[in-house]
Amino acid sequence: MIFSFTGYRTILWILLAGVVGIVVYTVIFNLQTPKAYFHGSRRGNTLFFEYDHDYTSNSFDEIRIEYEGEEGQQIVPIIKHDENVKNIQEAGEFVIENFHANVKSINVIYALQYDRFTAPCILNQEETIFID
């Protein structure tokens, strides 16, 4: 006999601990609310808008920014249904030329896709970010 009865019990405890660990990780992962990150900075009359999301989400379904400019309310779509609407400089960065100098904050409206136990989900949010 290669293993004694104690050896089998040890192996079963290790396997049970692994299964419990995987189940706990899966439950915790599925209870987390995904987070999006945005940053806006200005260089002269150019706005650099950066965006990203955490590991609990898949991708942005939609991002648009709104602000009050010289011409009134401005709405700029960046991503719509997983496709880039505007030219993106780099992954996660968008540039607006001739951005009005008096604008100090922008509203970001976004839809963030993520997966859960039962089905894919979308988180719809609006955030106000201040421009550096």
Image (spheres, rainbow, N blue to C red):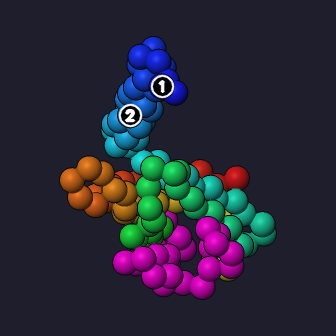
Q: Nearer the viewer, residue 54 or 19?
A: 19
Q: Is residue 86 magenta?
A: yes
Q: Quadrant of residue 52?
A: bottom right
Q: Is residue 67 left or right of 49 when viewed as pictured?
A: left
Nearer to us of marks 1 and 2 is 1
- Classify 124 as above or below 100: above
Residue 4 position within the rendered picture, expressed as x and y whole percent measured from the top left: 47, 18
Q: Nearer the viewer, residue 65 or 81?
A: 81
Instruction: Look at 43% across and 23% down and name the residue there.
Output: 8
Residue 30 position within the rendered picture, expressed as x and y whole percent measured from the top left: 34, 43
Instruction: Look at 44% across and 55% down and name the residue there.
Output: 57
Q: Assign the magenta stretch its main secondary structure.
A: strand
Q: Nearer the viewer, residue 131 or 113?
A: 113
Instruction: Write the start and end of the magenta stretch as one range.
Output: 67-94
Instruction: Look at 45% across and 14% down and name the residue there.
Output: 6
In the displayed orientation, state which residue is furthest to the right.
44
Observer able to see residue 32: no
- The CA distance from mark 1 to mark 2 is 27 Å
Which of marks 2 and 1 precedes in the sequence? 1
Amino acid tagged 2: Val
Q: Which mark is residue 19?
A: 2
Q: Is residue 28 magenta?
A: no
Q: Nearer the viewer, residue 117 or 124?
A: 117
Q: Which mark is residue 1?
A: 1
